[in-house]
Image (cartoon, rainbow, N blue to C red):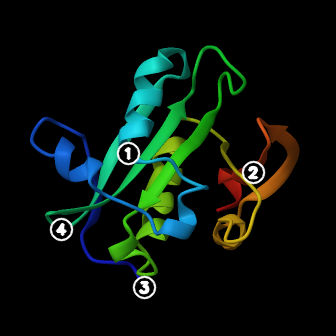
Amino acid sequence: MVPPGVHLREITDDNRDAVRALRVRRDQKQFVASVSKSLKHAAATPEANPWYRAVYRGDEPVGFVMLAWNPSAGPFTGRHFLWRLLIDKRYQRRGIGWEVLTQIAELVRADGAAELLTSYEPGEGEPWPFYRRFGFRPTGEIDDGEIVLRLALSAR
């Protein structure tokens, strides 16, 4: 089921506070940083070429996504890396995360990439089952204690 009206929007002065107010469930906090922390990471690491958007369902912000978009330096030079995916606790389990990943994969493919990378920290409640169902596979790499995953875009 594709949730109606799920789309990505730039974060502006008009929506920044509403997007920053989005929260995951308490048991997910160890796996995904807040929007505020993510925006600080983006500002502190311009070499990662951060690309981020608010996730909307209709006119309501429901999530946040951030990528290192084909950076010219760092551990993922020349690759697209899903750095953050946060769906607010009130909107989880509705297909929104799946739809966001589908849109991101299409954007990355349109940029000429053959893969999308991400990583996760292992632990109780980890996001690995979600990523596995979507088609990500472990690369065998570990980055800062996180397991790196790869989605082959040509296969989707």
In the rendered image, residue 115, in percent from the top left (x then y), is placed at 67, 44
Residue in front for this viewpoint, 128 or 153: 128
> What residue is disc 1 on?
35
Q: Amino acid at mark 2?
A: Leu
Label 1 SS = helix
Q: Please identify, in this view, whether the residue under mark 3 or under mark 1 is nearer the observer.
A: 1
User: Label 2 vs label 4: CA separation?
Assistant: 30 Å
Q: Residue 12: give its label.
A: none
Which residue is identified by label 3? 1
Name which of mark 4 and mark 3 comes first in the sequence.
Answer: 3
Q: First in sequence: mark 2 or mark 4? A: 4
Of circles 2 and 3, which is in front?
2
Q: Are marks 2 and 4 in contact (CB under 8 Å)?
A: no
Which residue is disc 4 drawn over? 58
Q: Position of residue 153 (x, y in %)?
A: 65, 52
Assess whether mark 2 and mark 1 are in contact (beta carbons under 8 angstroms): no
